[in-house]
Image (cartoon, rainbow, N blue to C red):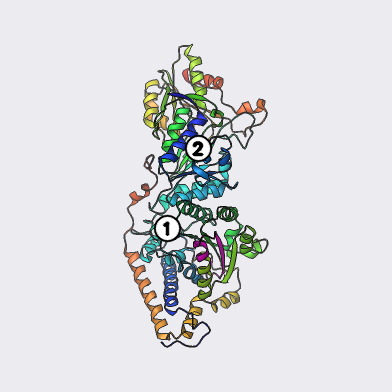
Amino acid sequence: MTEGPGPRRDNFDRERFLDLLALMHRIRAFEEEAISGQKEGLVLGAIHPSIGQEAVAAGVCGNLETADLMLSTHRGHGHTLAKGADPLAMMRELYGRQGGTCGGKGGSMHIADFGVGMLGANGVVGANIPIATGAAHALKLQGSRQIVTCIFGDGAVNRGPFMEGLNWARVFDLPVLFVCEDNNFSATTRTRDMTGGAGAGARAESLGIEATEVDGNDLVAVDAAARAAIDAVRAGKGPRFLTCHTYRMTGHTSVDPAAYRPATEVEEWRGNDPIARIEVALRMAGVEDAQLASLHRDEADAMAQIARSARETDWPEAAGAFTDVQDMGDPRERAF
Amino acid sequence: MAKSTYLEAGRRAVMEEMQRDDAVWALGEDLGRGGVFGQYKGLQEMFGAGRIADTPISEACIMGAAVGAAMTGTRPIVEMRFSDFALCAVDELVNQAAKARFMFGGQMRVPLVVREPVGMWRSSAAQHSQSLESWYTHIPGLVVVAPATAADNLGLLKASIRCDDPVVYMEHKNLWSMEGEVPEGEHVVPLGKAAIAREGRDVTIVTWSGMRHGCITAAETLEGEGIEAEVIDLRTLWPWDRETVFASVEKTGRLLVVHEAVAVSGFGAEIAASVAEALHFRLKAPVARLGAPRIPIAYAPTMEDEARVTPDKIVAALRRTMQPEPVS
């Protein structure tokens, strides 16, 4: 084995981080393809990119089992891919085509894939917190060893359901990991300007939930912190809270130029890119540049092919607008 | 048949469905002590604190947790205490529960029942008296049920618990102590089917919930004048039983819709419009609606009664429908 020098040489799981790096490239490539699809006018709805935040998705979801449940946000492509959803089905969903994860009924903000335990992105900030809490409540009633992970942004901590859900999870000692993916922005406003007190983790601790925080752009650190929290939750120790400090490299949506923040700040964070950082660690562990480059290229090429396939897929039948509404009653009543 | 109160019938429905199906459980404030009206009395002793769960005063989380629990293989009964308080959980009901199945392309369903006690009872003022059923009939994905009798509270609640759609189940607070005949054996009332509470040939009254009883009183009053009113209790508001209503109006040629809710934008408007569209040339009189004025409900009885739809007001509305003013 040709491991290079480095402080983590003895316990650094190279293969694991290569896999997670590939996942981070997949997430970024997915969103870059989605943004270019939108520029072409083919991805029609809003896209909330998580570019720059990929280490959170990979580091947290990389520690979950397929049977575990996960709930995400409007900025959820990364979490969903990391939970194991099919990128082609997701891309078709963004393009609003047949075979989309939700048959074209949801789009970017409403992707769910129950087959891999992904119980839904959500268009309402913080709304996934009570739902995740309830899913964990059901798992506890059922005596399951599965756990729930609920990922939300820093904006969500100022909504009432955040407090209600965390309190509930503590009161009932539920198997749920709350992950605050702190990218500094509540839509287009700095979260710190809108938040009293010490913020997310302190609020969790005030409710008796053990909270940790981690550099969310350091995949190795996120991975370790998430594993420790997930192990505790799975061991029946009740809810845990993890804040991952990261930065949203794009605007709130893909069409938001984010002119409300200085370019120097963005440049500084660009130097803190989570993909570049894990590549440095992997190089230190002896991975060749050529392997890193080919890993990147393979994911980018695969995603380009996925985007081509998505745009070549047919639209869903219009009649689908009337299915999956509800069992009782006729959705066609008063249809034109 | 045996006598039962409306409240006891609802309690029995929950008990029987929890015995029948381990996936059914209930969550809400004070349920362990029987719920705010006693409609869960003794159930925690019977089923344990896991399945009759006392919760914090966190309506958004009660509803949201039920959504998540329904997605995870259970069938929650959500107790909202007063329908007015359920407004704290409208996102969870309207944006989440009602939409999830569709939005996620039919991957799952959200089988939950939200019990929301509705309606006026004496001096409970503006935040404990409302009837907001039309808010929910407006929302694709939801079923809306409003039982008026003890037997229906048993049979409709059981049907609602078995329904795979999210159901807004509105019991009327003023009916809790009302007694009625209730079948002793298994009794499930199909959703979407109205009941003809009283037959008549001259005019059709469509109503639901507490107003069923005021309408029957009004119909009995007019019987002495030779006017036979047919009273249809919709029971389920969405989907509503168009066939039964249309058949009755074809027979009588006259329709009065009566509900306790504010008349403006009330669900009565949907029924009146549907009948006017479908049966215009069969009508002997314009369709009519009777509901509350568009005022908050007051505390003092003198003012409170201004918002109350009484048998006298129903009688007056029926007389107008029987003898409409000629067009001048």
- Decide if residue B324 is on the left or right side of residue A93: right
What is the secondary structure assignment of the residue under circle 2?
Answer: helix
Mark 1 is on which residue type? Ala
Of A245 and B219, nearer the camera is A245
Which numbered disc, 1 or 2, marks the residue closer to the eye?
1
Q: CA distance from mark 1 to mark 2?
A: 30 Å
Residue that numbered label 1 is attached to: A112
Q: Residues within 10 Å of mark 2 (few under 14, many from 20)?
A: some
Q: Which mark is residue B134?
A: 2
Mark 2 is on which residue type? Ser
Residue A170 drawn at (x, y percent): 58, 55
Of A222 and B303, nearer the camera is A222
Q: Which mark is residue A317?
A: none
Identify the residue shown where x is 47% and y is 48%.
Answer: B97
Instruction: Name the quadrant of the N terminus of chain B.
Output: top left
Give above or below for B272 relative to A96: above
